[in-house]
Image: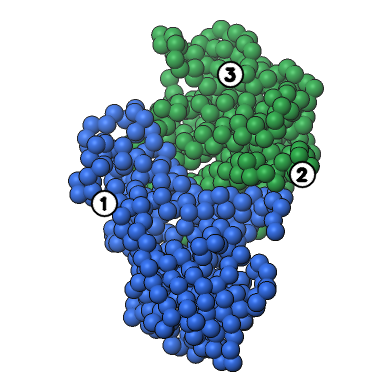
Amino acid sequence: MTIDLDLSADQRQVVESFHDVLTDKFPVSRFRGSRGGGRDNDGLAEVAALGWLGLAIDEHQGGVGLSLVEDVLLFRALGRHLVTPNVMASSLGVHVALAAGESSLAAEIMKGRKRVSLGSYMNGLGADKSTTALALYDAVGADFCLFWNTMQIACVPMDELGALQPARCMDWTLSLLRASAASKYNPSLAADAAQRLRRRADLLLAAQLLGLAEGALDLAVDYAKLRHQFGQPIGSFQAIKHRCADMRVRAKALGSLVLMAALSEHEGRSDAALQIAAARLLASRYAIENAASGIQIHGAMGFAAECDAHLFLLRAHLLENLGSTSIEREVEMASLPLMRPTSTEHVVP
Amino acid sequence: MMWHEEYAMSGAPSPLDPSFVSLNHAGPTLMACGTEAQKTFHLPKILSGETLWCQGFSEPGSGSDLASLTTSGRIDRDRLVVNGRKIWTSYADIADYQELLLRTEPGSKRNQGLTWVICDMRAPGISVRPIENLAGTSHFCEVTYDDVSIPVDNIVGEAGRGWSVAMATLGFERGAATVTLQLALLRKIETLRERALACGTPVQSSLMQRISIARSEALALRALTYEMFFGTAESPFEASIVRLVFAELSQRVHRIAMDLLDARNVDFELSEPWVEDYLESYSETIAGGTAEIQRNIIGERLLGLPRQARP
């Protein structure tokens, strides 16, 4: 078995088509002058109409029939364009519904007729451990909520969640609801299916965070070429140039790792879990570091709400703790054994 | 690539030994740019390990700014007469040949008028002074040339076009051997992780956190390197990313080792080979282009940021 880290001509074309559509329909500049969450909620319907929610679903089940690798490339592009995380929730919701044997529900979600929002456990410092609190993003009008932790992944009807309470979202481009998760909900997925879907969720999340790291980089580099001080573009100064170089290094290294992890998972290799854990761990760190650098490179403008640079930071923080906390990720990475590919699946040129 | 992976995972010695330059610099450069006679004479000896090579690019006055080099080669009929000094030349004291970059057109500027030539290290007029490094060992040297005579047949590529040959040489430096070094580093991380856990380091500790991050970054570096070798690199300058990530990760990993060793880290024998490797790792962000130069390359060549004003 070989690992070909080069995208095929077809894959390149698919990526180009993602970017063409997203640049047209979801330019990052669309948030300017429109403070207030939920603005992108309708984006889900547009994405569903494009068939992207079933990109990696077999054609006989109503999907496009591409693989996990194309799905990862899609979510990288969606991350870069700050598209609502409900797209990830719905895409994963289709897979969860199919794994649970609910194919008609899967079809409804794929067509955008049933909406799935994304939930995140709020169990950090000072949290009340007696109840499980969930943060729900862009969940107004959603039918289901998808969330996962290090053990399980679940797609729960919204009416099974406790009382919903609107709250102010740090990422102001999204709305936020607080919920106490229903303790009666008992996930019915088989353990191996749940593990597979958790890995998929972590991978798609890492891909979105990669997109954020890349988006922040591009914005900062453009600005460093444009903005003049002391009679020259600020990008000619090493202090700025080296910051940009570090952003590029992080984006590139993470990009290679996410692709490697996707290929390993797609091909069922023994090292897939380790590759995904590494990608997931670095993705949160690098997305935030790149977003923070992007703000600094923009100077005072970067601190202003009208500048897009900070949107990458807000979204990175919103996504960083989905599915696992940084401590859980670090503990996992310290514990997983290093898998060497067996000789039959050795990487060869 | 498979050979390099197996070599590294077997725990064999570091490839940064005296054969590194012959196998990873000189050999590939001769294959790409040498004459038939040069290839026939040198390549078998390089492969068998019969001859060792050293590099002669940097000078006391020309480090990061390599194109400012001044060591001269005056062409006198069928000979080059060489005068000047080269420095940081690893293993010059035991090498048989040197890849020598000279200014052969008097008055030429920057990267014009340079020539890449094979220098016999036993030629009269060459003197070698070993330089002790901060780890207390001395594998690098200063080489002085006093009217050293080299046949013009030893010129590799065209006279006056040595810059492009030298760039090819430096390109090979980023070749498959880096995989061996990377995997050796991954092995070290695994050793540190196992030792830290074995001696009761809590999984939720700053030390294990640093190991987890280093481990993830080593895997990212491996993915990056595979992509560079087996994919279509967007640009040859992406090698600078691999070089920079490796250099800085290597230093972080050795710092973790120093923390894990705690007070034993001052005792060379008790901390074999970590302390020596730790001290050696300071060369990683300097040798073969400093981290600052790599960031300039990434910024200017990959991101298209404007260059600084240069002479």
Checking the image for residue B273, the label placed there is: 1
2 or 3: tag closer to the N-terminus: 3
| Disc ID at residue A136 | 3
Residues marked 1 and 3, same chain: no
Q: Residue A193: percent from the left, percent from the top?
A: 43, 35
- Where residue B36 appears, x then y in whole percent? 52, 88
Tell me the kind of residue under disc 1: Pro
On the rendered image, what quadrant is the N terminus of chain A found in? bottom left
Query: Are the numbered discs 2 and 3 placed on the same chain, yes or no?
Result: yes
| Residue with the most extreme left position | B270
Q: Element at badge 2?
A: strand
How far is mark 1 from mark 2, CA to CA? 48 Å
Which chain is mark 2 on?
A
Residue A208 location, quadrant: top right
Q: Mark number for residue A232?
A: 2
Most foreground residue, B139 or A151: B139
- Label 1 vs label 3: CA separation? 52 Å
Residue A179 is marked as none
Residue B144 sits above or below residue A8 on the image: below
Indicate the colour of chain B: blue
Which residue does the image show at 34% across and 28% down from the upper left? Answer: B205
Tell me the mark number nearer the camera, choosing from 1 and 2.
2
Kind of residue at disc 3:
Leu
Q: Which chain is green?
A: A
Crowd band around label 3 with a 10 angstrom C-alpha radius: few (<14), some (14–19), many (20+): many
Residue at disc 3, secondary structure: strand
